[in-house]
Each structure stands twice: as structure tokens, then as C-alpha cells.
Amino acid sequence: MTTYYGSAGVARLAQDLARVPRELRPRVRAALTTSGGELRQLAAQNASWSRRIPDALKVRTRFSGTRAGVYVVASRLTAPGARPLEGITGNATFRHPVLGHGNEWVDQDTRPYLAPAVEAEADQAVGRLQDAMDQALRVAGFG
């Protein structure tokens, strides 16, 4: 059993995910999606002020490429303002046009919902992901 700690642990988890055999990926994906669901649920609670963002949040799992991992993502179609409101650029505000006034732009404060969930749940989330991966691999006879 591998232990994942901090950002180095997340990088190790990504490497391990990339090595999961193709035939085991559905079982591992299901376990990781379930464990990532608790982080998604906390982020949705943090965004309860929004009508769109909580329903737009989904858990995605990638096994290949340099971005293998478990992600909580927001649908651009369901909640177009989710990314700027999270503050993904690192700024405390973002600019947008005023609806119905094409030439008028305003600054709006960000309202992060995902980053606070990750900060609050980081250790528990990584532990759940590790347990889910270990369990799925054990059930498949690899642990």
C-alpha cells in the first residue's frame, strides 16, 4: 500500500493511476469517483449561495497523460460563472460586462467554494482516495 502525502503524494497518485491496467480502470474509477464525491459535496455546500454551481460540480477521473488524477470540475454549460467565481486566476476579483449594458464593465469579488473544500478536506480526501484505490486493486487481485 502506497501512502500519499501533500503535493508529492498527489503526484505519486497520478503516476500510480497511469499504471493501472486498462481492464481494472472501471473498478478503480468507480471507487475513486465515490471517494471524490465527498469533496464534491463539500464544495457544493460551500457554493450553496449559487443556483447553478452545486449541480454543475462533478467528479472526473483520468488515468492517462500528465494530468492523471481525480478532479472536481464544474460544467461550463450548467454554470458559466463557476470558474471566475472560484478565482482560478488567483485574483480576488474578476471583470465582466453588465447584462444589457454591453459597454459597461464591473469588478466582482470571487467567492471560492472548491479551494476551501480542498483545504478543509485535503488529508481526509487523499486518505479516502488511497483507500479506494487500494480496495479496488485488492478486489481485482493486485494487492
Image: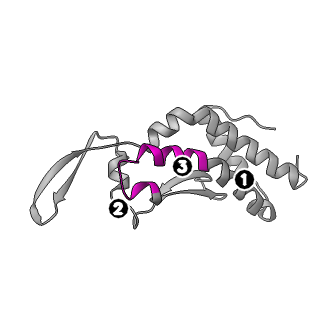
Quadrant of the image for the N terminus?
top right
Give the CA distance from mark 1 to mark 2. Answer: 29 Å
Q: Which mark is residue 132?
A: none
Q: Can residue 38 be found in the magenta stretch?
A: yes
- Residue 80: assigned label: 2
Q: Nearer the viewer, residue 6 or 75?
A: 75
Badge 3 amino acid: Arg
Above or below, 133 relative to 51: above
Q: Say the numbered circle drawn on residue 40.
A: 3
CB atoms at circles 3 and 2 under 8 Å apart? no
Of mark 3 and mark 2, the one earlier in the sequence is 3
The foreground one among 108 and 7 is 108
Q: Position of residue 32 (x, y in %)?
A: 68, 51
Number of numbered tags placed on the structure image = 3
Amino acid found under the numbered disc labelled 2: Pro
> SS class of the residue under badge 2?
loop
Q: Is residue 122 left or right of residue 139?
A: left
In the rendering, which numbered label is found on residue 31? Answer: 1
Residue placed at 33% from the left, 43% from the top? 111
How far apart are labels 1 and 3 at the CA level? Answer: 14 Å
Left of 29 or right of it: where is 85?
Answer: left
Please tell me whether residue 26 is drawn above or below residue 130 in the rendered image.
Answer: below
Which secondary structure lies at badge 1? helix
Q: Earlier in the sequence, mark 1 or mark 3?
A: 1
**Disc 3 residue crowd, few under 14, some 14–19, many 20+, Cα 10 Å:** many
Q: Which residues are magenta?
A: 37-54
Q: What amino acid is labelled 1 in the image? A: Ala
